[in-house]
C-alpha cells in the first residue's frame, strides 16, 4: 500500500485539483495551500473543502476502515503523534501564493500541497493504525 512520496504528492495534487474543478473553482486554483486541522469540530463553510484523514484515505488510496474501532484508532494515532486529523483547502480563492505568513510550512498555518509532507504523514499514520486494529 506504500506509494513513493512523489507519487502520493502527484495523486493528492490531482485529487485536490479535480475536487476544486468539480466544485466550480477555476483551473488556476488547482495549486493550493492547505491548513492543517487538529479538530474536525470546526464550523462548516461552502468556501472550504474539508478532507478528514478517513475521507482522504478513501479518496486517494481506496482504503476504508472496516469498523468504528479502526476509525477511532486512526484518529487516536494522529493525536498521539500530534498530526492533523484533516486538512482544509480554500475553494473560493488560491491562498498562500506570495504569503509571508510566519506559520507557513510549520504544521500550524499554511502548508503547500505540493511541498509539505504533512497531509501524507496524516494519511500514512491514520491508515497504519486503522489497518493494525482488529474489528470485533
Image: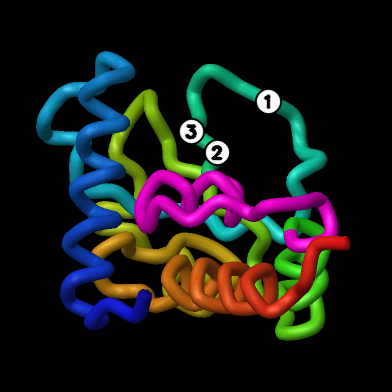
Residues drawn in magenta: 52-70
* Quadrant of the drawing holding the C terminus: bottom right
- Element class at badge 3: strand
**Rendered image coloring scheme:** rainbow
Q: Position of residue 73 (x, y in %)?
A: 79, 69
- Alpha-carbon neighbours of circle 1 within 10 Å: few (<14), some, or many (≥20)? few
Residue at mark 1 to residue at mark 3: CA–CA distance: 9 Å
Q: Nearer the viewer, residue 47 or 103?
A: 47
Q: Which residue is mark 2?
A: 50
Relative to 36, does residue 130 appear above or below in the rendering? below
Q: Decide: few, some or many residues near mark 3? Use Cα within 10 Å; few <14, some 14-19, many ≥20.
A: some
- The single residue placed furthest to the front in the displayed view is 136
| Residue assigned mark 3 | 49
Question: Could you tell me what secondary structure mostly forms the magenta stretch?
Answer: helix
Q: Earlier in the sequence, mark 1 or mark 3?
A: 1
Magenta span contains residue 66: yes
Instruction: Determine the image quadrant of residue 126.
Output: bottom right
> Disc 2, disc 1: CB below 8 Å?
yes
Residue 86 x/y as whole percent: 60, 54
Quadrant including the N terminus: bottom left
Mark sitting on residue 44: 1
66 or 98, which is in the foreground?
Answer: 66
* Residue drawn where x is 36% and y is 52% of the image: 60
Residue 95 shows in the view: yes
Q: Looking at the picture, does residue 13 appear above or below residue 22? A: below
Asked if the residues shown at circle 2 and circle 3 are in contact, with their CB atoms under 8 angstroms apart, the answer is yes
Residue depicted at x 46% and y 64%: 101
Amino acid at each position: 500500500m506504500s506509494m513513493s512520496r512523489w507519487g502520493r504528492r502527484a495523486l493528492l495534487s490531482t485529487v485536490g485539483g479535480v475536487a476544486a474543478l468539480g466544485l466550480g473553482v477555476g483551473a488556476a486554483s488547482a495549486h493550493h495551500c492547505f491548513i492543517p486541522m487538529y479538530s474536525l469540530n470546526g464550523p462548516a463553510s461552502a468556501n472550504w473543502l474539508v478532507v478528514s484523514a478517513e475521507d482522504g484515505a478513501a479518496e486517494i488510496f481506496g482504503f476504508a476502515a472496516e469498523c468504528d474501532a479502526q476509525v477511532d484508532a486512526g484518529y487516536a494515532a494522529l493525536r498521539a503523534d500530534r498530526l492533523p486529523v484533516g486538512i482544509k483547502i480554500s475553494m473560493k480563492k488560491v491562498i498562500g501564493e506570495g504569503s509571508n505568513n510566519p506559520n507557513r510550512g510549520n504544521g500550524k498555518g499554511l502548508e503547500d500541497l505540493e511541498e509539505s509532507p504533512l497531509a501524507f504523514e496524516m494519511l500514512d499514520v491514520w491508515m497504519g493504525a486503522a489497518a493494525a486494529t482488529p474489528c470485533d
